[in-house]
Amino acid sequence: PLPSYDEVLVCSPDTGEEEVELLVRRAVSPGSQDQKIYCLLGADKLVYKVSKKLESHFFRLVQSSSIPNYRFLIFCNAKTDSSYVITAFDAYKVTFPDCSETEIQTYLKTQLQVPSGTAPVAQAFEKPHQQSVKFVFSERAGMGK
């Protein structure tokens, strides 16, 4: 299944150290072996101080953890070459092949399906019939969204 809302952190220059540390802890700490996939999206946008903390928390927790098969993905813009995150995790880098918009849409249509009989407006809020993707952006986090 796709990652759920508690497994994804969409990064910006305002993303704090605590948010990044919490996600890393969830990903590589004991109890995280419940097949969740933790993701940092746009990690190249993190400021230098937060990027350094991400690196130190990640490597410290991985060394002290007994979990060999954690699932932690860091997504960065390949065109960004001034990001500390890209440099720090370069040894783990995987480049994805270029796909056309049509190929991506075709793939997503086969993977993400709405249960039959569901109203179009309500389909994004249905749980856990199949998979759905929701993004909520807010200037004020934790305001009941």
Image (cartoon, rainbow, N blue to C red):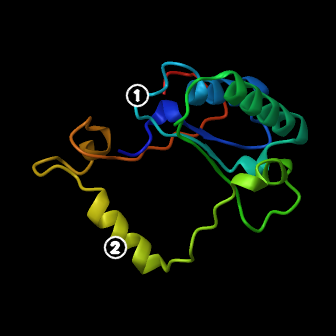
Residue that carries the numbered disc 2 in the rendered image: 106
Q: Is there a contact, CB below 8 Å, between mark 1 and mark 2?
A: no
Residue farthest to the left? 117
Residue that carries the numbered disc 1 in the rendered image: 34
User: Where in the figure is residue 63, as x and y percent of width and height?
Assistant: 71, 27
Q: Residue at x 67, y 34 (%)?
A: 139
Q: Viewed as shown, does residue 9 lie left or right of 57?
A: left
User: Where in the figure is residue 70, as x and y percent of width and height?
Assistant: 54, 35
Q: Which residue type does callout 2 highlight?
A: Thr
Q: Residue at x 22, y 52 (%)?
A: 114
Q: Viewed as shown, does residue 59 lie left or right of 142?
A: right
Quadrant of res 91: bottom right
User: Where in the figure is residue 87, as x and y percent of width and height?
Assistant: 84, 53
Q: Viewed as shown, does residue 49 lie left or right of 44?
A: right
Secondary-structure class at tag 2: helix
Q: Residue at x 32, y 44 (%)?
A: 124
Which tag is nearer the camera, tag 1 or tag 2?
1
Res 13 label: none
Q: Residue at x 77, y 68 (%)?
A: 79
Q: Which residue type does callout 1 highlight?
A: Asp
Vertical side of 56 occupied by 143: above or below:
above
Q: Of label 1 and label 2, which has the lower sequence position?
A: 1
Vertical side of 18 occupied by 138: above or below:
below
Secondary-structure class at tag 1: loop
Viewer-proximal residue, 55 or 43? 55
Quadrant of res 138: top right
Image quadrant in which the N terminus is located: top left
